[in-house]
Image (tube, rainbow, N blue to C red):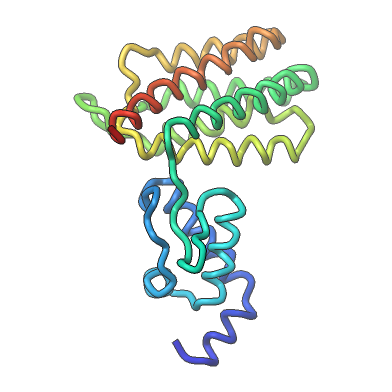
Amino acid sequence: MSHASSLADARDPTLATAVHRRLREDILSGRLPPGQKLRLRDLTENYGAGASPMREALAKLAAEGLAEQLEHRGFRVAAAAPYQLDGLIRSRVLAECAALRESIRRGEAAWEEALLLAEHRLSRAARSLDPHRFISNPDWEACHLRFHQALLSACGASPLLAFCDRLREEARRYRALSNTLAYPGRDVAAEHVALARAALDRDAETAADLLAQHYERTGAFVGADLGRMTE
């Protein structure tokens, strides 16, 4: 890359943002696995950006906890150990249950309609692309995300919702790294129906308990699978 091009990269904050977004998605999706070295030379070639925006992107990832800075040795993808998942699930339960209670308290007719629609679309989407073996369906994943966002959307606290979104994305990385995606013996659809019903009935405590159980079940499946993978 030429000196002039490097200077242009350094002055272009949108390039650093775009590179950060791509790197972040590759970490969250598991394409960049935990512990992988993030070598500057390789990254600049693979992502088509200069050293300056790449360093800025890596620094942002480290601040978010998705990358680790090594003393005098660059960066690597952050670890994803089962014990870290336990803390993440606990944080999600605390944050999202608080947001859910407030969303139920404040939610008006538009919130109810949005939640009903989100639950209906989720119930119609197939979790797997193959009826004989589990292959995650991107449409179901998108509907699942919108359903959980709809539950909390009326809480009226944007910083809290942003924090919940960040925790949700971190949890997605653990799910992507795990081979346990079908959750044998578990009726995920029924859990969503019960959760929506409790929220729409304005039963905040039941809804919060169901949400906590929902995340704790997922954490147990994924954590056990990650534990087997690291043995």
Whole-percent x, y for residue 116 in the image = 60, 20
Q: Of residues 166 and 100, which is closer to you in this image? A: 166
Relative horizontal placement of residue 206, taking residue 69 as reference (left or right): right
Q: Is residue 140 above or below residue 30?
A: above
Whole-percent x, y for residue 167 in the image = 58, 37
> For the point 39% across and 48% down, which residue is it?
34
Relative horizontal placement of residue 94, taking residue 212 as reference (left or right): right
Whole-percent x, y for residue 214 in the image = 51, 18
What count of labels does the image hold?
Answer: 0
* The N terminus, quarter of image: bottom left
Q: Quadrant of residue 155?
A: top right
Extreme-front residue of the structure: 71
Q: Is residue 107 above or below residue 13?
A: above
> For the point 47% across and 49% down, which residue is it?
78
Q: Of residues 112 and 218, which is closer to you in this image? A: 218
Whole-percent x, y for residue 207 in the image = 63, 12
Q: Is residue 56 above or below residue 52?
A: above
Q: Of residues 222 and 147, which is closer to you in this image? A: 222
